[in-house]
Image (cartoon, coloured by chain):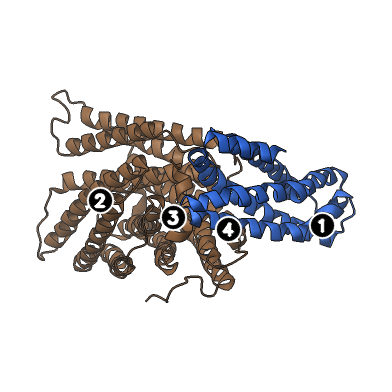
Chain colours: A brown, B blue
């Protein structure tokens, strides 16, 4: 039996989609990252106490979640999962259709939120919903045909189930906005239930479980170590699923306080979530410690920081559950979960995986393909890292001090970082094209 | 990472010592001054080791894998992986041929600054290619050998490689 990363590396070359497909998703994510910081800058006044509601902070949040995180996750799952689960490349039509539907959909959702136009928001939400249903169908087909990698595949199925909850709650909330504006539509779920479900199942469920699952392939591959213990990875997943189910039950107030006034279900959900994360991190650090390659470069500074933010976000959630009266805490929780954990982890991994994928594409039919390092603008990445950390620290300070001006400054620094990341990405594409003018090895795709 | 076959264990040991050498080289190149690095006696000692690795180990190790292992891999229906690894060998040999004269000059502390800069670029390329290649072999080729070789073939190949 080949270890996970072995199968991944061995089969990768023959199971690549045309480069233009995954890279259009990654390119869009790069652009949306810049727009997200600009939206946060535009909504800086309301950002320090933001807990929801139409406006530019909500637009910025969804430009990050839908535009950067989910966009990249679609690109990665379209390319990495078939390779990891040893499946042939299938039709390229569906991925292209997803991109054409999803990208303007995200733009419309963000514009609708930012400009306070529920009709535009609803139209965008329908496009995003349809695109994500197609993503779910593709993901399910890949998982059904998967061979080996039980833990990765199980994380994939769990993430897919969470996506169903995310889409239902998102549609419900979008319809609520339309209804409130006197237009058609009624919510499917009460907002007080829909919002916590949406938050938990999007952040920790769909995106979180995809990130944890793909880590079991990517981290050992980078560190040159054996695949983590599959049984323990499944235990971690089981704990995470139990945590999500408890959080969902708590949001419905199904005996949440068990008559005692203490939110036991929510607390138990946080505790199980922390246990799941602790086990996952033990497996990750064991993998790094036993790896033959210790020097993992700057990208892993972001990854390690993201790993620290994940349990911190759960501790913040527990503090909120226990009734902390600190008004900054709910927004800080969002910052830790979205900016610290998910965005940090994704950008760290993208810095490694994009040059790797690019060199695999260029390698086709080339005797001495460029190395991933030669395709990477390290200086741009260093600037991005610096700005990313400064922006997050600035936002945290702005939230604590309730300062719109500080939030605007932090978002501006984030935008500079996003521009540096865009420089890294577009330089990579230019170098890729220069190394192999016909790197796709296939017809150009619209 | 542990392997059951003698051949896998031997190749893994060589990979590990190779990675250790490449790690030391990477650090030394990152630390080396822009001027005078090619005349540094400490770097010269490392260049001697690196040169030996390029001249002997790479050739012997690669030839053995191509003649004895990749063919078996292809016969077992894993021709894609064998072809990918062979292409990487070719690229590494090409880089080795380019930098070997520079490495020899550095080993004698007789490399000028322009030559040292060329060596730095070439060595970084070599490090990246070798690390990526060892990554693929450690996670793809060596575990497969555990299934592919029987006890007798394993013994014969290990003996042939050692002699």
- Helix, strand or loop at label 3? It is helix
Question: CA gap, disc 3 to disc 2?
Answer: 36 Å
| Chain containing the residue with disc 1 | B
Q: Residue at x 12, y 49 (%)?
A: A189
Residue position marked by numbered label 4 in the rendering = A372
Nearest to N terminus: mark 2 or mark 4: 2
Asked if marks 3 and 2 fall on the same chain, the answer is yes
Residue A40: image location, x then y, percent: 39, 58
Q: Chain of mark 2?
A: A
Q: Left or right: where does residue A445 sit relative to residue B108?
A: left
Residue A210 locus on image (x, y percent): 35, 47
Q: Is residue A187 above or below residue A369?
A: above
Q: Which residue is mark 3?
A: A405
Question: Alpha carbon of mark 4 to alpha carbon of mark 3: how far?
Answer: 40 Å
Q: Which mark is residue B102?
A: 1
Task: Check if mark 2's residue and mark 4's residue have beta carbons within 8 Å.
Answer: no
Give the mark count.
4
The part of the image, by quadrant, that contains residue A186 is: bottom left
**1 and 4 marks on the same chain:** no
């Amino acid at each position: 039996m080949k270890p996970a990363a072995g199968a991944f590396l061995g089969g990768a070359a023959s199971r690549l989609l045309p480069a233009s497909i995954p890279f259009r998703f990654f390119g869009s994510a790069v652009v949306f990252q810049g727009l997200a910081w600009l939206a946060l800058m535009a909504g800086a006044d309301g950002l320090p106490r933001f807990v929801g509601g139409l406006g530019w902070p909500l637009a910025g949040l969804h430009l990050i979640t839908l535009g950067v995180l989910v966009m990249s996750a679609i690109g990665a799952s379209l390319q990495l999962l078939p390779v990891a689960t040893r499946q042939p490349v299938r039709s390229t039509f569906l991925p292209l259709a997803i991109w054409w539907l999803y990208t303007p959909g995200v733009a419309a959702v963000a514009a609708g939120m930012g400009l306070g136009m529920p009709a535009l928001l609803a139209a965008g939400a329908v496009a995003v919903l349809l695109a994500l249903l197609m993503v779910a169908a593709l993901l399910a087909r890949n998982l059904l045909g998967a061979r080996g990698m039980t833990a990765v595949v199980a994380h994939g199925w769990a993430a897919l189930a969470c996506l169903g909850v995310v889409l239902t709650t998102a549609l419900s909330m979008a319809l609520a906005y339309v209804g409130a504006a006197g237009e058609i539509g009624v919510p499917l779920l009460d907002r007080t239930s829909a919002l916590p479900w949406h938050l938990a199942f999007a952040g920790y469920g769909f995106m979180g479980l995809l990130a944890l699952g793909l880590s079991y392939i990517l981290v050992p591959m980078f560190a040159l170590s054996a695949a983590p213990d599959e049984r323990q990875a499944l235990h971690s997943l089981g704990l995470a699923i139990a945590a999500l189910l408890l959080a969902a039950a708590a949001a419905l107030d199904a005996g949440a306080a068990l008559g005692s006034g203490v939110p036991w279900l929510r607390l138990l959900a946080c505790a199980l979530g922390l246990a799941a994360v602790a086990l996952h991190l033990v497996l990750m650090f064991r993998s790094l410690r036993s790896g033959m390659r210790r020097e993992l470069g700057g990208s892993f500074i972001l990854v390690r920081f993201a790993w620290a933010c994940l349990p911190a976000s759960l501790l913040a959630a527990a503090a909120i559950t226990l009734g902390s009266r600190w008004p900054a805490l709910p927004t800080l929780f969002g910052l830790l979960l979205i900016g610290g954990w998910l965005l940090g982890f994704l950008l760290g991994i993208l810095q490694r995986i994009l040059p790797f994928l690019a060199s695999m594409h260029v390698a086709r039919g080339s005797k001495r393909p460029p190395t991933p390092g030669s395709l990477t603008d390290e200086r741009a990445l260093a600037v991005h890292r610096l700005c990313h950390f400064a922006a997050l620290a600035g936002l945290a300070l702005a939230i604590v001090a309730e300062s719109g001006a500080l939030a605007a400054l932090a978002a501006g620094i984030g935008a500079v970082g996003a521009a540096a990341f865009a420089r890294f990405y577009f330089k990579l594409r230019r170098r890729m094209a220069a190394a192999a003018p016909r790197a796709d090895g296939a017809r150009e795709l619209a | 990472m542990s392997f059951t076959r003698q051949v896998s264990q031997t190749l893994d040991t060589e990979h590990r010592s190779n990675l250790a050498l490449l790690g030391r080289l990477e650090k030394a190149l990152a630390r080396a001054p822009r001027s005078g690095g090619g005349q540094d006696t400490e770097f010269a000692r490392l260049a001697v080791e690196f040169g030996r690795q390029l001249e002997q180990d790479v050739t012997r190790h690669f030839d053995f894998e191509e003649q004895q292992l990749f063919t078996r891999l292809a016969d077992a229906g894993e021709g894609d992986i064998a072809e990918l690894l062979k292409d990487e060998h070719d690229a590494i040999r090409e880089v080795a041929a380019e930098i070997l004269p520079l490495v020899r000059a550095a080993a004698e502390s007789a490399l000028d600054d322009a030559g040292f800069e060329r060596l730095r670029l070439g060595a970084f390329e070599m490090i990246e290619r070798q690390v990526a290649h060892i990554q693929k072999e450690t996670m793809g080729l060596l575990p497969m050998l555990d299934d592919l070789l029987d006890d007798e073939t394993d013994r014969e190949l290990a003996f042939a490689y050692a002699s």
